[in-house]
Amino acid sequence: MILLTREPLNPKTITRSVEDQGNGAVVTFLGVTRNQTDGRGVLYLEYEAYPSMAEKMLARIALEVEAQWGIRRCSIAHRFGRLEIGEVSLVVAIGSPHRAQAFTACAYVVDRIKEHVPIWKKEFFVDGEVWVGMEGRHATPSTR
């Protein structure tokens, strides 16, 4: 399951999508909107995405982990739009015969998403705002 949506994510549904009788492990990661970053109070986040490209890249990442670690199933769901404190922005669920591969694959998926998928996060603070990962640049997602 690959999902990119503005709607709230249901981690249970995404986790169920990787269930398989051949699994010995299911590992799930939830990215959650926190109320502070480096001591600065966060009001909310906004994610922007290039949806068609993001979905293709998420699917490619899922195939990579299935091939590299023998993962039986990998589901990835990412939300975009405005997210309030405590809301889930990312769900990665891995179903695998063995736990070590499931944990490794899950961490790999999260890292690959942050590094390569065209989804951008803007943090809104009590005292300003910033595009995460774009500090010091004069680019915005619309100029990429």
Image: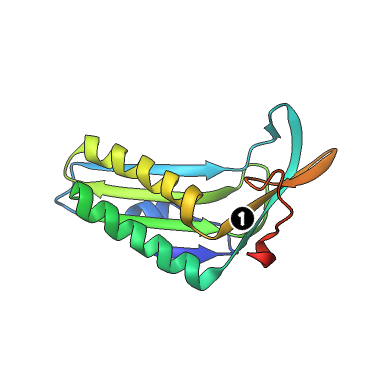
Q: Secondary structure at mark 1?
A: strand
Query: Residue at the spot x=78%, y=45% of the render?
Result: 129
| Residue type, numbered disc 1 | Trp
Residue 32 placement: quadrant: top right
Spot the residue most to the left.
22
Q: Is residue 24 left or right of residue 5?
A: left
Q: Relative to residue 79, is residue 136 depicted above or below?
A: above
- Place of residue 65 in the rendered image (x, y in percent of width and height, measured from the top left): 27, 52
Q: Is residue 60 left or right of residue 68?
A: right
Query: Residue at the spot x=55%, y=65% of the render?
Result: 5
- Place of residue 77 in the rendered image (x, y in percent of width and height, measured from the top left): 46, 58
Residue 102 placement: quadrant: top left
Spot the residue most to the top.
39
Q: Nearer the viewer, residue 51 or 32?
A: 51
Q: Quadrant of the C terminus?
A: bottom right
Query: Residue at the spot x=36%, y=64% of the render?
Result: 59
Q: Nearer the viewer, residue 60 or 126?
A: 60
Residue at image mark 1: 120
Q: Quadrant of the N terminus?
A: bottom left
- Place of residue 109 in the rendered image (x, y in percent of width and height, measured from the top left): 38, 48
Spot the residue most to the front.
137
The residue carrying pointer 1 sits among few (fewer than 14), some (14 to 19) or many (20 or more) residues within 10 Å by Cα, namely: some
Residue 85 placement: quadrant: top right
Asked whether the viewer can see residue 17, the reply is no
Spot the residue most to the right.
127
Asked whether the viewer can see residue 70, the reply is yes
Query: Residue at the spot x=70%, y=57% of the render?
Result: 139
